[in-house]
Image (cartoon, helix red, strand yellow):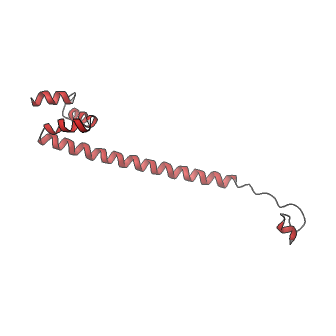
Amino acid sequence: MDNLEEGLTQEGTPTPEVDNSQELDEAEAKKAERRAQQEAGSKQEVDRVKQIAFDLAKKSAELDGSTLLDLHSKDPKLAKEVAKSFGYESVEDVRNFLE
C-alpha cells in the first residue's frame, strides 16, 4: 500500500501523469462563451433602453418642441437624433424654427 501512496502502481512502475490541459481548455472556452453571451445581453439591454429614451423624447417633442431644447442641455446626442428624425440638421435649427 505504501507504493500506491507514493505514486507507484501495483507492479512498482510510476503512475502515469494525466494531461488535464484539454479539460482546462474546454472550461476556459465555456467561460469565454458565457462571458460573450453576457456581454451580448448587456448590449441588447442598453440598445433597448436607448430606443425607449428616443421614443419618449420624440413623443415629447411632438407635443412641445421646447422639450427638445431642454433635452439638449441633458443629452445633446439624443436631442440631435430626435431633431434629425423630424428632418432638422441640428437642435439649433429646431430652436430657430420655434423662435
Residue at x 12%, y 40% (from the top left corner): 64
Give coordinates of residue 89: x percent, y percent: 22, 27
Q: Quadrant of the C terminus?
A: top left
The quadrant where residue 91 appears: top left
Q: Is residue 96 left or right of residue 13?
A: left
Give coordinates of residue 11: x percent, y percent: 90, 66
Q: Residue furthest front?
A: 73
On screen, 10 above or below 90? Answer: below
Q: Is residue 24 left or right of residue 99?
A: right
Residue at x 51%, y 53% (from the top left corner): 34
On screen, 87 above or below 5? Answer: above
Q: How many marks?
A: 0
Q: Quadrant of the N terminus?
A: bottom right
Residue at x 47%, y 50% (from the top left corner): 37
Q: Is residue 32 left or right of residue 46?
A: right
Residue at x 60%, y 54% (from the top left corner): 27
Give coordinates of residue 18: x percent, y percent: 76, 57
On screen, 79 above or below 9? Answer: above
Q: Residue furthest right?
A: 12
Q: Residue furthest bottom?
A: 1
